[in-house]
């Protein structure tokens, strides 16, 4: 994809530097968890990196993202280790990215590019693939300057440059047209989803949606509760597509259960926009099961990030049941402390998705929930 070649995943000859930045706007996750989340993202893509470096920024420079002293620190590592690619943990503006490339003399990839490539690998259905494509096209559009020719080659031509049209204008029109075509294909696919949805609404069965941070156990829970086989992996963004299954409790059909894409800190805006149709399901939810991984010390921050994303999507007013999952990873004492900490999150259930028995509290809560 893209205006420059994809992030190198297999070429051992490429020297990659992982640059984790602790920026002043990032306060939800602990430094340690933010760092390990970033390396998990990079590992999910299969990137092998030689060097990693962590820096703390007090302020963000508008043109370079990094302040002067930090720029020099990173440059020194790039030169010493002969770095070819730098992957930055943050979302960079196109200008910042270009300036960093010029300064370091190597290719720079930002968080958006990294997540887009992970999504590209994880998209399996036609709908998922089109949504990723739409997010990519929007991302390319922001990065046209200087890389136009390469981009045109990769995205294929449509027509010719109009009279008086600069190459940049032409490429922008080209990408807008491709985006329009993708959207048309997406709308056609969604028609069948609408038919299913109408049928479901007519059936009056409550819709229960699993939401949460990525990798918390949403797919493992739907698999155990509905005997489905959604891919559940120790990978960020294993699930991108929506799966809906009938949910039976004590042999009684109590509703439909949906699993979909997880969230992460600073999920790129283009992806949220593109995935709105998949996440549309949430508009119809009668209950949200907000799954939380309590073995991650930053779980309260992850809750904040998920609630913020739900708010952006306009679905923050839905009834919510917190599902505090992966309790099997806690010691008895940690579990005791957790019970106090989660008092503020009501209603809730404590679970572990290693066996159906581990979901007893959740099943009980679902049995007792009154759907209005
Ligand atoms: N120990 C333990 N591991 C769990 C539990 N629930 C899920 N896992 C593991 O955590 C990893 C992620 O689980 P998933 O079910 O794929 O998580 P998800 O929320 O669907 O993740 P995404 O689709 O990537 O957003 C897998 O390796 C699961 O086996 C649990 O309660 N305890
Ligand atoms: Mg999943």
Image: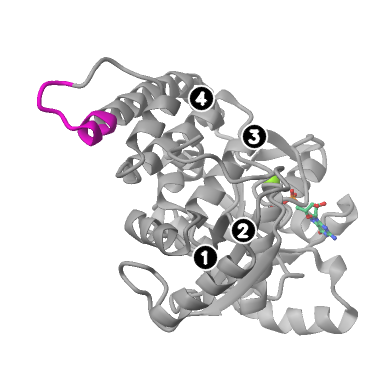
Residue at 71 percent across and 47 percent down: it is 46
Residue 351: x and y in percent read: 79, 62
Query: Is residue 146 visible in the rendered structure shown here?
Result: yes
Residue, disc 4: 193
Q: CA distance from mark 4 to mark 3?
A: 11 Å
Judge whether residue 234 is colored magenta: no
> In front: mark 1 or mark 3?
1
Q: Please, is residue 332 above or below residue 2 in the view?
A: below
Near-viewer residue (77 or 64): 77
Judge: label 4 CB < 8 Å from ligand 2.
no
Q: CA distance from mark 1 to mark 4?
A: 28 Å
Residue, disc 1: 305
Residue at 61 percent across and 78 percent down: it is 31
> In front: mark 3 or mark 2?
2
Q: Please, is residue 185 above or below residue 21 in the view?
A: above
> In front: mark 1 or mark 4?
1
Residue, disc 3: 244
Which mark is first along the chain, 2 or 4? 4
Residue at 23 percent across and 32 percent down: it is 167
SS at circle 2: loop
Judge: label 2 CB < 8 Å from ligand 1.
yes
Q: Residue furthest top?
A: 159
Residue 176: x and y in percent read: 29, 30
* Number of the label disc, if any, that sits on residue 213: 2
Query: Is residue 286 visible in the rendered structure shown here?
Result: no
Range drawn in magenta: 162-172
SS at circle 3: strand
SS at circle 1: helix
């Amino acid at each position: 994809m893209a205006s420059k070649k994809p992030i190198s995943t297999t070429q051992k000859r490429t020297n990659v530097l992982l640059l984790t930045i602790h920026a002043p706007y990032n306060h939800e996750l602990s430094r340690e968890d933010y760092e390990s989340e970033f390396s998990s993202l990079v590992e999910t893509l299969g990137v092998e990196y030689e060097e990693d470096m962590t820096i703390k920024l007090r302020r963000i420079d508008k043109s370079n993202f990094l302040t002067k002293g930090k720029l020099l620190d990173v440059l020194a590592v790039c030169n010493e280790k002969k770095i070819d690619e730098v992957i930055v943990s943050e979302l960079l503006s196109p200008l910042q990215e270009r300036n960093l490339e010029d300064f370091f003399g190597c290719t720079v990839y930002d968080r958006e590019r990294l997540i887009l490539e992970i999504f590209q690998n994880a998209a399996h259905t036609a709908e998922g693939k089109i949504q990723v494509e739409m997010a990519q096209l929007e991302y390319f559009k922001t990065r046209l300057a200087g890389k136009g020719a390469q981009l045109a080659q990769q995205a294929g031509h449509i027509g010719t440059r109009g009279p008086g049209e600069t190459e940049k204008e032409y490429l922008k029109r080209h990408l807008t047209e491709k985006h329009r075509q993708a959207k048309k294909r997406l709308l056609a696919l969604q028609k069948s989803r609408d038919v299913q949805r109408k049928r479901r609404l007519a059936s009056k069965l409550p819709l229960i949606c699993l939401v949460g941070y990525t990798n918390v156990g949403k797919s493992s829970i739907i698999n155990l509760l509905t005997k489905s086989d959604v891919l559940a992996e120790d990978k960020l963004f294993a699930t991108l597509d929506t799966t809906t299954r009938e949910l039976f409790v004590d042999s009684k059909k109590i509703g439909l259960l949906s699993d979909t894409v997880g969230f992460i800190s600073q999920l790129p805006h283009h992806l949220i926009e593109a995935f709105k149709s998949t996440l549309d399901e949430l508009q119809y939810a009668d209950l949200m099961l907000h799954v939380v991984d309590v073995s991650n010390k930053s779980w309260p921050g992850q809750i904040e990030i998920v609630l913020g994303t739900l708010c952006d999507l306009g679905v923050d007013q839905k009834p919510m049941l917190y599902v505090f999952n992966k309790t099997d990873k806690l010691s008895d004492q940690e579990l005791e402390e957790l019970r106090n900490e989660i008092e503020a999150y009501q209603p809730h259930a404590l679970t572990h998705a290693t066996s159906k028995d581990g979901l007893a509290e959740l099943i009980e809560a679902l049995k007792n929930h009154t759907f209005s």
